[in-house]
Structure formats: structure tokens, C-alpha cells
Image (spheres, grey):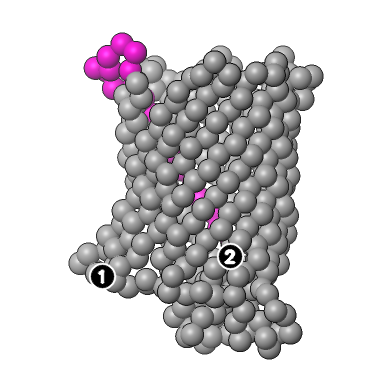
Amino acid sequence: MKLGWDCPTDEGKLSLAYTGSVYSFVPESDWTAHQHTVSASYSDYRAHDFLLGMSGEVGGNWNRPAYSAYSYYELGWSGWMRSSTGSWPVEARMELGSRAYPESGAFDFRKIAFEFSARHQWQTRTTLMLNAGYTTRSYSNTTIDDLLAGRTQGSSYQYQTSALVGQGLTEKTGLRLSGWAVKGDGESRWWEDYWQVLDDPLARTGFGGRIQLSWLAPAALTARGYVGGQRLHEKYVTVEGNHSDRLDRFGEAGVIVEGLLPWTAAGRVFSWSLELNAARQTSDDTQYVYERVAAMVGIKYAW
């Protein structure tokens, strides 16, 4: 669930937001999990064609009674600058974060991320977006693995780059092509026993892409069809408890339909979405091979 509130001011805009989710696996398991985040942001519009902003958030993830080792609290801050001058609007962003796992101190980390993006639009209804970023983690506590490797503090990093091209085909149809690549290094964190292992999301290298076709259909409907895939080398811990590297190959296809509810009152928006998705993953480790078919329904209300 997502809730948001915007308050325009004389010099900018103040925004408050809440994001939450709850998962339950009863009766297959007594494991329940819930995640909640509260954030506030402020954007300053005083400078013409130039925007400055900052935001802060606090949140956590709670798992009970199983997997409590992965419950955490976190704090985050970000600041950004956006310029809309010239034919290539640009944006630069910096993020700082800290996460603590009360039952698994080896997982505690601090994060710093930098991101730069630019976009350009042509009269041919063509849009190009470019993005580049860098993220690094520093773990707060030293484990036995760290000592054996001759380091006093574990760390990881990742470089990211992506590009997106959007092309309007007709007044009601459009095509979007996107691709990305990452290069990272790091190592899974091991605390007390094998069942308390945290794979580092930065310790992966690979690439992926997606093709999407959109159509503004009758009856205020929007339909999208997409095909995508990725190929990733990931560092992880095997079921035998060994540090290793595996190659995952993932492919998916799906359809999304969005629309407005007919009884929406003036000044309010009550919309819905339906997504059907089929995905398949192969891997060097059979533990990570799966096929999935899913249906997702969403409702959004804005006023």
C-alpha cells in the first residue's frame, strides 16, 4: 500500500509518503513479514529552470517468527539537483543510508550512492534517457570471514549504466526500448551459521533489457505488452556453505491493462490495473531454477 500527500508552498513543495506491505505464508508456513517506510521530501523551485531537493526516510522490515535474523531498521537521506536549461535536462543525485539488523550484526551496513541522468526529446516524438551511477556499501562489523581474508571491514561496490529510447509510432501507439548493465564486486555476509547468510545485491555483474509496446485503447484503457530478459553473474553462498559464483539467465513476457473506474467523481481519480506475467529462470545452480505465472491487480485513488 502507498499513501502520498503533497503540499505546495510559495517557494516549492513539501511531500509526505508512506509505503507498507504485509506477507503471510499460512498455512504452508507460520512465517509472516511486514515492511513499512515513512518519508518526507522538499523541492525548492525558486530558481528558474533549476530545482534543488532533499528527502529523508525511516523504515524497517520485520519477520516473525521465522527469519527474524533478516529483520532490520534503516535510515536514509538523499539530495538532488535538476536543471531544465538547454536541450538536455540533467539531474544529479546523492543518497546516504544506514541499515541495522538487531539479531545479525554482521549484516549492518552504511551505503553511499551517486547517480547522474540526462534526457532529450526530438520533434519526431523520440525520447532518449541516459543514466549512470555508482553505489558502495561498508559493513559495520567484522566477521571471521573478514579476518581470514585479511580485511578489517567488509565492503562492496557496483557501477550501473542504463539507456532508454521511446518512440511514438502513431497518435495512440508507442514503442519503448531499454537496456542496462552493472559491474560489481563483494561477498555474501555469514553470521553464526549457514541459515543466516545475506547475499550482497551489489556483488553481481551482467546486463538486461526490455521491449514494450503501448496502446491508448478505447474506453479510456491503456494496454502494454512487454518482453524482457537479463543475464547476471552473482556471488552467493551455496547450500554446502561455500562462497561461489553462479550465472542466472532470466526471461519474461507480460501484458498490462490500466483504466479508470466509470463512477469517478470530478476532481478525483480512481484507477485500476491488471498485469499478467510469465517468467522463467535458468541457472548454474539448480536451486535457483524456476518458472512462474502471476496475475497482479492494483487500485489507485487520488484526490
In the image, residue 80 above or below residue 190: above
Decide whether residue 258 is among the magenta residues: yes
Question: Hey, what amino acid is under mark 2?
Answer: Phe
* Residue hosting label 2: 109
Q: Is residue 38 above or below residue 109?
A: above
Is residue 162 in view from this perspective? no
Q: CA distance from mark 2 to mark 1?
A: 30 Å
Which residue is pictured at 43% across the width and 20% down the height?
A: 217
Q: Is residue 66 above or below residue 256?
A: below
According to the image, label 1 marks what residue?
Answer: 29
Task: Compare residues 230 and 182 and report the one nearer the observer.
Answer: 182
Report the front residue among 198 and 7. Answer: 7
Q: Residue furthest right?
A: 86
**Quarter of the figure with residue 189:** bottom right
Tell me which residue sits at (69%, 32%) in the image.
Answer: 81
For this rendering, which residue is in front, 14 or 160? Answer: 14
Q: Which x, y percent locates residue 96?
A: 62, 51
Quadrant for the C terminus in the image: top left
What span is in magenta? 246-268
Q: Is residue 290 left or right of residue 34?
A: right
The amino acid sitting under disc 1 is Ser
Residue 211: x %, y % from top left: 59, 39
Q: Earlier in the sequence, mark 2 or mark 1?
A: 1
Residue 87: image location, x then y, percent: 78, 20
Residue 34 in view here: yes
Q: Is residue 229 above or below residue 39?
A: below
